[in-house]
Amino acid sequence: MAKDIDWGNLGFGYMKTDYRYVSEYKNGKWDDGAITADENIVLNECACVLQYAQTCFEGLKAYRTKDNKVVCFRPDLNAKRMADTAKRLEMPPFPEERFLDAVKKVVKANIEWVPPYGSGASLYIRPYMFGSNAVMGVKPATEYQFRVFVSPVGPYFKGGAKPITLRIPDFDRAAPRGTGHVKAGLNYAMSLHAIVDAHNNGFNENMYLDSKTRTKVEETGGANIIFVTKDNEIVTPKSSTILPSITRRSLMYVAEHYLGLKATEREIYAEELNDFKECALCGTAAVLSPVGKINDHGKEILLPSGMEKSGEITQKLYDTLTGIQMGRLEPPKGWIFEIN
């Protein structure tokens, strides 16, 4: 039985659910972990996460499919990405098989919070890890917590995704050989001023260029970018400072193997932006967010797909990927992780 919630009018925000998972790292090893009802965390005032931002996170969703199964989409890739992030931040990686087990335990414990099929809502899953012991000098913590909580969320865009407007800012998102390729909390803290500034100036998001040459497109503050050429080729930026989006990788596979389109990852120069007919942001929260306009320091680049609705290819990509996630289309092997 699902909770008595107005699923169709659910927003995209935090809602406390019944249970979450906690495992602690002390004396060089992770404990067995457990499900708990307590959503609060008690930390020392000098905890490493509070002083030096030693924290990382992941984001994925659980869905109820057409045949009423509860599933997650490619969580093994989230497990690997979190392990890679932990290594870069000098944190002990949480074992990938235990990551999957923790996700399964939390979703099963909160099964009544998984929205019904067709509601447009899903159960957002947030695994995260942080340095928990007191650290005064600049160095890694010696104790950590790995946690997973869930929250039911509505669609990222109510009433369908209307094309958004991006701007190319003067801010940089990530430095060469920095942490742009991992899902560290500090990356998102650095983007907050830029996104508020974008909103204050009438834009929905920032389209960052590479910080070394400021000539190549990278990503936004919280999503990868895909483009569609006039020949219907799917193109996405290639860079060592871009977060490896699971949604983007899946969309590129879908483009080739389900839609029969050419899909290429390559360096994309800002001067090429006029050559594309569609553009969209991709990520877990919204899957695909169409872009209608890009502002480059006052010069407007209008995508031929327009500001009214998704472009034709963007819409096909969205329908196909969500069809796989919701059980309407046959998935590639290993993409769907069944919970119940």
Image (cartoon, grey):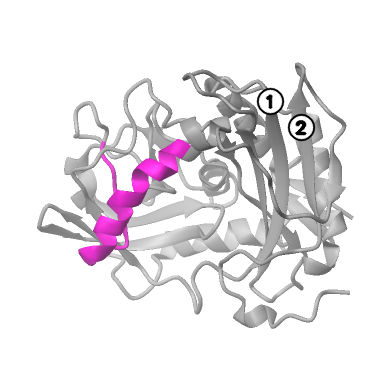
Choose between 157 and 112: the one closer to the eye: 112
Q: Which mark is residue 52?
A: none
Q: Is residue 170 left or right of residue 281?
A: left
Task: List the single residue furthest toward the left.
Answer: 298
The amino acid at mark 2 is: Glu
Residue at the spot 65% in from the left edge and 20% down from the top edge: 142
In the image, is residue 291 above or below residue 168? Answer: below
Choose between 96 and 127: the one closer to the eye: 127
Q: Is residue 81 left or right of residue 105?
A: left
Residue 54, percent across and down? 53, 31
The amino acid at mark 1 is: Glu
Residue at the spot 55% in from the left edge and 33% down from the top edge: 46
Q: Is residue 283 left or right of residue 107?
A: left
2 or 1: tag closer to the N-terminus: 2
User: How packed is label 2: few (under 14 Cα within 10 Å), some, or many (20 or more)?
Assistant: some
Residue 296 makes an appearance in the image = yes
Residue 162: quarter of image: bottom left
Residue 106, percent across and down? 81, 51
Magenta: predominant secondary structure element? Answer: helix
Q: Which residue is mark 2?
A: 24
Residue 90, percent across and down? 57, 19
Tell me which segment is drawn in magenta: 186-209
Residue 100, percent across and down? 78, 39
Residue at the spot 23% in from the left edge and 37% down from the top edge: 269
Q: Which residue is mark 1?
A: 143
